[in-house]
Image: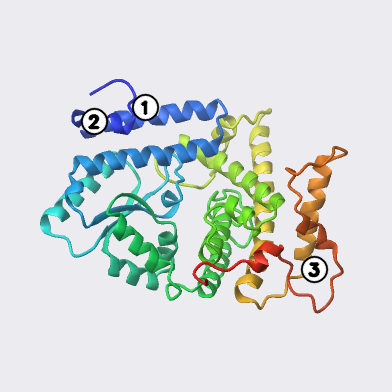
Amino acid sequence: MTDTFLSPDSLQESDLCPAALKQQLAFFFEQQKERFLQQAPVADLVFERASYMDGLLNRLWTHFEFTQCPTLSLIAVGGYGRGELHPLSDIDLLLLSDSRLDKKTETKISEFITLLWDLKLEVGHSVRTLDECVAVGLDDLTVATNLQEARLLCGNKALFHRLKMRIHAENFWPSDVFFRAKVEEQTERHARYHDTAFNLEPDIKSTPGGLRDIHTLSWVARRHFGATTLMEMSRFGFLTDAEYRELNECQNMLWRIRFALHLHLRRYDNRLTFGYQAAVAETLGYQGEGNRGVEFMMKDFFRTLGRVAELNHMLLQLFEQAILGEATVTKSVLSMRTSNFAETLLRRGNRRFSRRDPIPSSTCFCTLPVTATLRGYLPQPCANFVPQGAG
């Protein structure tokens, strides 16, 4: 057992016992914590943690000799499938098989998952054949959503490709059905928080305006348009540049608070409870006499939730027109898009604009007269885009 940090691909067989692996995970945690406290970009840390876990799982895949199981694939799903992990995030795995597993392989999988649990990793897993996976996905919106974000870690590439073909088929949650289901799911989630972001102990992930509202936009765009990231949504014209930058800024703010919270917790949670608000505020550098640091942090936090909620409302209405073709986009939504443009102008002040500024020409036309018969406003690239699978 070594007393220095090693990359996963450098681990020897003697380093793969639970005690040694726990030590390596502790080294990695402390390394990330130190970088976070030194103001490293939180996105870098979130993606880096997912990358580290990719390497570790690949190393263990070889250690357990799953390379001798040619019909098996190890697949990351959910947030881990997006390549995003916070210190206490769930690591959701799908072990996909081309056929029923024999007893020997089932035993090895059990030992593999048990080791991950022994390492105190928040692992959720399922073991399914391709047909079982599709059948469960058709019956369960959460599973279907997780599968949209599936990412191959190791194993049978052809089998993974067949999975992607099945879940991207038009008869697997058609985009209009998927859109309505995700909107209903969001409405129900918001109702659990009394349709307000202003709760005393808010959930960073699930509260209205939280990370889940950003995820909902991404899920809908991925299913209908094939855009896998906020950047792609912007590049394809589904978001204006200003909207992309604002969503990205909000996501980074929520990620910073969530990452700081996870540094202080022992078990997975996303609630910013009274018991941890002061510690999180201090970690993020908020200062002031008495409780002022917490007040400053919560003010920024609630402002961010409000911005996300507004953008979520506006963009879902625009997506509804693009996907269902039956929504009338209201004056208030056009006004929101115009105000985003105006805010960009104010930020720029008297400086000259360049081609790199977040002011697409399509946004400039938000001030066209609004009549009772006006249908929704969409940037031209989005209006002309052919949905995934339609060509």
Q: Residue at x 30, y 33 (%)?
A: 9
Find disc 3 in the rendering and name its residue.
331
Sequence-first tag of 1 and 3: 1
Find disc 1 in the rendering and name its residue.
27
* Residue 250 in the figure: left or right of residue 64: right
Sequence-first tag of 3 and 2: 2
The Cα atoms of the two marked residues, 1 and 3, are separated by 54 Å
User: What secondary structure is found at the residue carrying circle 3?
Assistant: helix
Q: Position of residue 208 (x, y in %)?
A: 60, 57
**Hey, which residue is sitting farthest top in the picture?**
3
Q: Up-down: is 249 above or below 12? A: below
Q: Nearer the viewer, residue 212 or 262?
A: 212
| Residue 55 shows in the view | yes
Q: Residue at x 37, y 68 (%)?
A: 166
Hey, what amino acid is under mark 1? Answer: Phe
Few, some or many C-alpha atoms within 10 Å of disc 1 (few <14, some 14-19, many ≥20)?
some
The Cα atoms of the two marked residues, 2 and 1, are separated by 13 Å
Q: Up-down: is 59 above or below 288? A: below
Few, some or many C-alpha atoms within 10 Å of disc 2 (few <14, some 14-19, many ≥20)?
few
- What is the number of the mark on residue 321? none
Frontmost of labels 3 and 2 is: 3
Find disc 2 in the rendering and name its residue.
19
Q: Position of residue 130 (x, y in %)?
A: 29, 66
Quarter holding the N terminus is: top left
